[in-house]
Amino acid sequence: MQTKLEQLAVYQGQFGDFTITQNDRIEVIIYRLGLCFASLNFAIATLSVLIIRGQPWVLNLLTPLFIMFTVGVGISLVTIHIYLRSLHRLLQVFWVIGTIMTLIIARQSSDPLALFVYNHPSTLFGIGFTFAALTGIFFKEAFCFNRLETKFLSLLVPSLLLGHLTGILPVIVEEVFLASWGLLFMIFSLRKAIQSIPSDIGDKSVFAYLKEQRSI
């Protein structure tokens, strides 16, 4: 009953009234499923690295887990609602660059992907674009919904990557940062799952206005 009422509801936007369609709702659900899929694979990979440690089969398992994580992030970037189209496209370009570099590194390296990247921090200049795209999602969520976990993640992710790239972080600090990332990412995706769908769609009148301005 509530869903039918929401479908019939007319919302007042900054530039006029708008309604929320079934397609809008489906996009939000897919966006959230992408986040859940990405966070689940990232959490499994994190637990494997921190608890089991160093086993060859774990290192081999990390490659498909990272690929599925990347797919989840990509799905979310296709369906996320961001007012600034240029920012949306930029995050998608980051994801494409990161994905291509991941495939190149995985194909050329004789070592498991995670081990090669860990031992060659400079590869983060390529594969790190995927994480930059994810950080963009965290920043958007922090800005729009003032979520505490995404505020931390917006700082935590680049801090860990840059810290490893420059070699200034002790291993124990990297492990703490990684564990925090995995935990906060799961908290974020679970909270998104129970958030009201209209709030994730945003003000459709703003999207319509910006589209009209681009066509002028």
Image (spheres, rainbow, N blue to C red):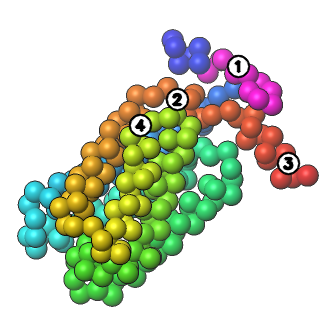
Verify whether residue 41 appears in magenta.
no
Classed neighbour count for the residue bearing mark 1: other residues with Cα under 10 Å, few (<14), some (14–19), many (≥20): few
The mark closer to the camera, 4 or 1, is 4
Q: Could you tell which of marks 3 and 2 lies nearer the N-terminus? A: 2
The mark closer to the camera, 3 or 4, is 4
Q: Closest to the observer: 130 or 208?
A: 130
Q: CA distance from mark 4 to mark 1?
A: 30 Å
Q: CA distance from mark 3 to mark 2?
A: 27 Å
Disc 3 marks a residue whose amino acid type is: Gln
Which residue position is annotated with label 1? 10
Which residue position is annotated with label 3? 213
Q: CA distance from mark 1 to mark 3?
A: 23 Å
Extreme top residue here? 1
Identity of the residue drawn at 24% across and 62% down: 174
Q: Could you tell which of marks 4 and 2 lies nearer the N-terminus? A: 4
Left or right of 176, for residue 206: right
Q: Closest to the observer: 186 or 26?
A: 186
Identity of the residue drawn at 68% across and 57% down: 86
Q: Which mark is drawn over residue 62?
A: none
Q: In the rendered image, is residue 103 in sight? A: no
Which residue position is annotated with label 2? 197
Residue range (magenta): 7-17
Identity of the residue drawn at 23% across and 87% down: 110
The mark closer to the camera, 1 or 3, is 3
Disc 4 marks a residue whose amino acid type is: Leu
Please provide percent x and percent y for residue 179: 23, 52
Left or right of 94, for residue 214: right
Left or right of 19, for residue 176: left
